Amino acid sequence: MTPPTITSFADLGRAVAALPGPDEVAGEAAAKREPQLTKPAGALGRLEELAAWLARWQGRHPPAVGVLKAHVFAANHGVAARGVSAYPASVTAEMVRNFEAGGAAINQLCRAFGVAFAADALKLDRPTQDFTKAPAMSEVECVDAIVFGMGVVTDGTDALALGEMGIGNTTAAAALAMGLYGGAAADWTGAGTGVVGERLKQKTAVVAEAVALHRTEIASPFEALRRLGGRELAAIAGAVLAARFRRVPVVLDGYAATAAAAVLEAAQPGALDHCQVGHLSAEPGHRRLLEHLGKTPLLDLGMRLGEATGAVLALQVLKGAAACHAGMATFQSAGVSGKDS
């Protein structure tokens, strides 16, 4: 299904209210096949659930995972000038060049696992506004980034891993999560690229300051995104939205990617049913955010790099789930006795 045209937050609201649901025919076919496979019921644990989830959201049975893609969005944040990161804002552009040269961790993982990779930089020469002083983006800028993200999702993709790069974006993620779900800034703010001690206290204070400034204006999740987010986070939200319409299951990376997608869930419960979270970030706010979303990550490796690394690793779990579901013999075909009555 082609995603709707989005030119405003009003269009965005209508789109999330009209999200297509899962294909229950494919889901029923998966549920019928699973008990016939040569294993005790439930022996593959969550892999069994993931195979059925893939079938429902791809709209076919058996599910396929031959065409896997990872997409990273990069952008700069005005709040970085407040010293919230251990690295200068120039690193965003430098890492984009590293992606393009094939030298980043995500390049190695995609190469190792046969995942197509692309990275897009969104107006790196125009950082968002410092959101402790003004909204990060105008509605037009936010919508433009959302639409850009929607445009990267193509039919024929079996699963899509989404990640980000942007100095200062764990500060944006913390502010956005706090704006959506409340609590204290310390609940949502972590070390990010490695800030500790007084720097971490400063970062936490910046998050609190930003949410306090915009508190009366962020009842709408989309307003929270434009005021407290960033272009790469808006692009991730757009990609998640388009993937739902195109029946492409999504694997989100860590804290920032999950915070971006949470905007859609806050606007329309169930909007992230076609998404899995690839891994549990070492950022402490990620666990809290996942609790609010009711999501259990596929992996927990202590990672906090971003750039879709955890999501790409998790794609391999989906490949295993689909391979077992489609390829295993049934008790009948293998001549193996089933469970005694």
Image: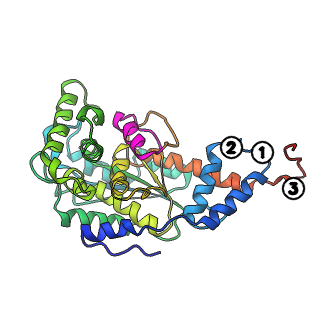
Residue 101 falls left or right of residue 94: right
Q: Secondary structure at mark 1?
A: loop
| Amino acid type at image mark 2 | Leu
- Label 2 crowd (10 A; few <14 / some 14-19 / many >=20): few
The mark that comes first in sequence, 2 or 3, is 2
User: In percent of the image, x 50 and y 64: which residue is there?
Assistant: 248
The correct choice, above or below, for 60 with respect to 201 in the image is: below
User: In percent of the image, x 58 and y 51: which residue is there?
Assistant: 318
For residue 44, which numbered disc appears in the image? 2
The mark that comes first in sequence, 1 or 2, is 1
The correct choice, above or below, for 281 with respect to 112 in the image is: above
Q: Secondary structure at mark 3?
A: helix
User: In percent of the image, x 49 and y 42: which residue is there?
Assistant: 296
User: Which one is nearer the viewer's eye here, 212 or 117?
Assistant: 212
| Amino acid type at image mark 3 | Gln
User: Which one is nearer the viewer's eye here, 194 or 286?
Assistant: 286
Q: Position of residue 295 (x, y in %)?
A: 47, 45
Residue 260 visible (yes or no)? yes
Q: Secondary structure at mark 2?
A: loop
The mark that comes first in sequence, 3 or 1, is 1
Do residues under tags 3 and 1 come within 8 Å of each other at their CB atoms?
no
- Which corner quadrant of the image does residue 146 belong to? bottom left
Q: CA distance from mark 2 to mark 3?
A: 19 Å
For residue 39, which numbered disc appears in the image? 1
For residue 19, which numbered disc appears in the image? none
Residue marked by disc 3: 332
State the extent of the magenta-drawn residues as a range.
279-295
